[in-house]
Amino acid sequence: MTTILITGAAGFVGSHLARYILENTDWNVVSLDRLDEAGDQNRLAPLRHYGERFKHLWHDLKAPINPVMLRFAGDFRYIAHLAAGSHVDRSVRDPVSFVMDNVVGTAHLLEYARHHQPNCEKVLHFNSDEVFGPAAEGEVFTEHDRWNPENPYSASKAGAGALCPAYAAQYGTPIVETFCSNIYGKGQYREKFIPLCADKVRNGEVVQIHARGGTVSSRLYIFVDDVSRAVLTVLQKGGVMHDARSGKYAIVASQELSNLVVAEAIANHLSKPLRYELVENPPNRPRPDLRYSMDGSKLAA
């Protein structure tokens, strides 16, 4: 029986991935999460309906994983590492906590895989397209372009990602890395743009939209179930890192949308007027990145 370990399964993306795998495979899922403001116990409740196929354990990855805690699960065929601090505004306020969660946490996960899961077929690191930095108009990055993170969140994800080829080269850890664009879906934490925008529109509040010189920020928004399907595809069919151009896959939407267009669509859906302002240098995120863009053709093929 295939068993997968998912870190961060009480988070937004991790809980959807766990559900998707339980619905679409016969795998068992073991969740590892510390449960905080982003990791919600309520997200785990529906997963418990799968009985013995789903198990959850509390652990903060800032500390090494005790292998005794996971001994009951036996060998993991796959490990999907999704546990991470993921919001730019909070990383600006508290960058060191993001280094601890994303860099140190990833190191502890990789050490556990290296020492205690020698039969694991793939260790997937769920990274962000933000590590490549802002893209100029018309610019599209591939999985193998140079990283240029410009905020503490993306820098911490880049630090975590830098460990992956090192472990693959030095220890032969079978690592695969994905770079995902902006995700939306049911149960997303309220600080993210789409649920935050919906709340503000519903309450008649002003929506702040990042812009610069009259150019409005844009994103490649992808639905969370499409992300789960892509992750499962990479686990089952993707290659692992063995040189500079292998084992990396972009998970991106096909259409880039202005955040103003997204806000207008939300307001129309709620049958409410949109009150907004374009903000160039918000105090919570100085010099925000206006645009990210990646080529998703490798995974599509």
Image (spheres, rainbow, N blue to C red):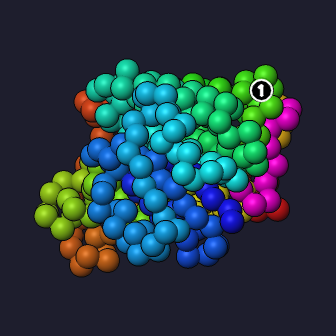
Residue at 75% across / 60% down in the picture?
A: 236
* Of 119 and 145, the residue lying toward us: 119
226 shown above or below 4: below
The residue at 31%/34% (across/down) is 90
Secondary structure category for the residue under label 1? helix
Foreground residue among 114 and 267: 114
* Residue 263 point in image, percent of width and height: 34, 62
> What residue span does the magenta drawing correspond to?
235-243
Q: Residues within 10 Å of mark 1 (few under 14, many from 20)?
A: few
- Foreground residue, 215 or 225? 225
Task: Look at mark 1 in the image and give the residue it sits on.
Answer: 171
Whether 239 is among the magenta residues is: yes
From where the camera sits, is residue 222 visible? no
* Tally of numbered tags: 1
Decide if residue 134 is on the left or right side of residue 196.
right
Report if residue 3 is visible in the image.
Answer: yes
Q: Position of residue 1 (x, y in %)?
A: 69, 65
